[in-house]
Each structure stands twice: as structure tokens, then as C-alpha cells.
Image (tube, rainbow, N blue to C red):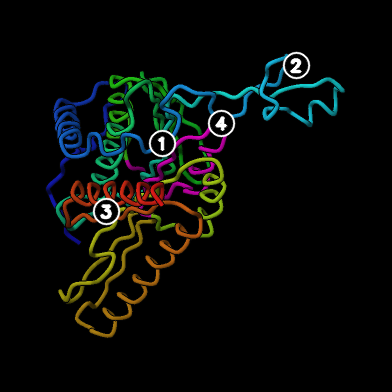
Amino acid sequence: MARSVAVPVPTPTPAPGAGAVPPRTEAVLSRLQLMVTRKLDGLLQGDYAGLLPGPGSEAGESREYRPGDDVRRMDWPVTARTTTAHVRRTVADRELETWLAVDLSASLDFGTGRWLKRDLVVAAAAAMTHLTVRGGNRIGAVIGTGAEPVPTRRWRATPAPTGPGVTVRVPARAGRKEAQGLLRAIARTPVRPGRSDLGALVDMLNRPPRRRGVAVVVSDFLAPPQQWGRPIRKLRVRHDVLAIEVVDPRELELPDVGVLPVVDPETGELHEVQTADPGLRRRYAEAAGAQRAAIARELRGAGAAHLRLRTDTDWLLDMVRFVAAQRHARTRGTTR
């Protein structure tokens, strides 16, 4: 199947030992930052708690009770064990920590619209990065790819094999310079043959346990929902979760172009499909619709916000609408 040649974020594979990002990729990432800050900057201001000074709600350490302490902060389990009155300290949530789980399976290296699916993954990561990295906020990422090893880069991310694929962890840091380094890490991670374990990738955001923040999962979610549904539910217990699903129109319906050779990018298997058969096209569309409905149902059941980006539409406009809708829903909920 022919793929679009419009690649807004190229994904070159550096030569062994090379750590620099090609100038074209650097320019594209800068252009993405400009696009995002123009259209999305400020839309998420105030969308999370803890920006204002105050006692906070995050549990901290216990200490002995002193006259004048708020009795509502009594730590009764510790008091019962020690027979001495203790109060629980709380930590003010004055900064937001965001983690990205970026799936770069071989199925992402595909696209028949304006972009490749991989391009949308990088664009979505850029949007979330530039929206959240401000005021001391930190952002980190775990990147999953195929089975071939990914060399360690100078940004100090250490690859670790997990499941059938390889994951790369980029530590959470504050500052726009560090955010740009994270985006470079995502943009230059090559897509490897095979499928990363999306469930294991999401579960990496639960280890070690972190205080309340935002977790963003970017994938095409083609893995069976039973593989990643439970890890997302577990993640949602403590964090706000956003699932960004990238879709190509040819994954939803087949065109009538006669015999079409189709290659599975994850296994290399070649199949020839007779797309002139209207019954086959109908069954394909029904199966694809059922698959996407199952993905949406699993994400909804896990309590995650769900944003779908397509390779044949304006992804930035879709994201603007989504962010505006989320903000409106939260504002409406607090005014009732």
C-alpha cells in the first residue's frame, strides 16, 4: 500500500555513535513548538490542582503531635501503634509531573493520509510537552519500540528490554530545554520490527509509585485490550490519564483498487486482498468499527480521557477542540 510522502517529523536512524539530531528534525520540532504555543498555549492553565500555596492534599510523613496542630490531620494508625499522638504532614502540590508512554511499534510506521501515524505520535508528544512544561513542571517519558536494541544516547536514557520489545526511559525533568531533549529522544528513536508490549509500557508509569500527576499514553492501541486495559485502570487510580489514539483511514475501510498486496509491518507477512469484493470491504469495515469500539469502551471503562487523531485530518485542530471541550466540562462541573 502506498504511503504518503508528507513527513512533518522525519525519523532518521543515526549512524552508530552519532548523537546529534539532523538539522531538518530540529527545524521541524521548532516549528511544532511554534504551532502548539500559538494555538494551545494557556488552554490548560488551571486544569490541575495545587498551583496556589496551601497545605496540599498529598500525604507526607508523620510526626508527633504538638499543641496547635490541626486535629483533622491526626494519623490514627501511627498513633495506635506508638501510643503517642501523631499527625500526618501533607505536601503542597505546587508543580505538575507528566509522564508520556509513547508506543513506537512497527504498526506506527504507516500512513495513507497527510501524515504517517508515527508523525502524529511525535506531534501529540510535542503538544503535551509544550502545554505542561511551565512553572517548574516536570515531564518524562517511556518509549517502547520493537525487539532490536536501541543504543544509549547522551540524554542519559537507559534502554531496558521488556516483553518482546525494548523500552527507553527518559527521566522527568523541568525546563523547556529538557523538554526539547525529550522530544528529540522520541523523534530519533527508530521504529524496530515487532510489537512493543503496550501493557508493560503503561505499567512502567506505575513503577516506582509517584504522587498524583498526569499520564499520557500515545499509541494506535492495536494490541488486544486485555493486554493494556488493566494497567491503565491501575494508572487511573492515582493519576489523570489521557489516551491519544492515532488512526489511519485505511485501517477503518478498504478502497476499491482491485488486488491489493498488504504487508504486516510487525511480522513481515504478505497477503493479497481482493478489494473489489464489496462483501469483503463491508466485513472489513464492520470488524474495524468493532475493534475501535472495543478500544473506546476499554478506555472509557478505565476512566481515561480519549482523544483520537487521524492521519487525514488537522490533528492540531482536533487537539484544540478536545482541550477546549475538556476545559468546558471541568468548568461546568465546578459551577454546579
* Residue 239, horizontal then vertical, whole percent: 50, 40
Asked whether, in this view, residue 41 is left or right of residue 133, the answer is: left
Residue bearing the label numbered 4: 57
Q: What residue type is labelled 1?
A: Tyr
Residue bearing the label numbered 3: 309
Quadrant where the N terminus is found in the figure: bottom left
Which badge, 3 or 2, comes first in the chain's sequence? Answer: 2
Residue found farthest to the top: 66
* Residue 32, horizontal then vertical, whole percent: 18, 35
Mark 3 secondary-structure assignment? strand
Which of discs 3 and 4 lies nearer the camera? The answer is 4
Q: What residue type is labelled 2?
A: Glu
Which badge, 4 or 1, comes first in the chain's sequence? Answer: 1
* 235 in relation to 226, above or below: above
Distance Cα–Cα, label 4 vs label 1:
13 Å
Distance Cα–Cα, label 3 vs label 2:
52 Å
Residue 254 picture quarter: bottom left
* 224 in relation to 53, above or below: below
Range of residues picked out in magenta = 191-220
For the residue carrying disc 3, how many other residues have a C-alpha within 10 Å: few (<14), some (14-19), or many (20+)? Answer: many
Contact (Cβ within 8 Å) of mark 3 with mark 2: no
Residue bearing the label numbered 1: 48
Q: Which amino acid does label 3 sit on?
A: Leu
Contact (Cβ within 8 Å) of mark 2 with mark 4: no
Mark 4 secondary-structure assignment? loop
Question: At 23% from the left edge and 51% from the top edge, which residue is drawn?
Answer: 321
Question: At 39% from the left edge and 68% from the top edge, which residue is drawn?
Answer: 293
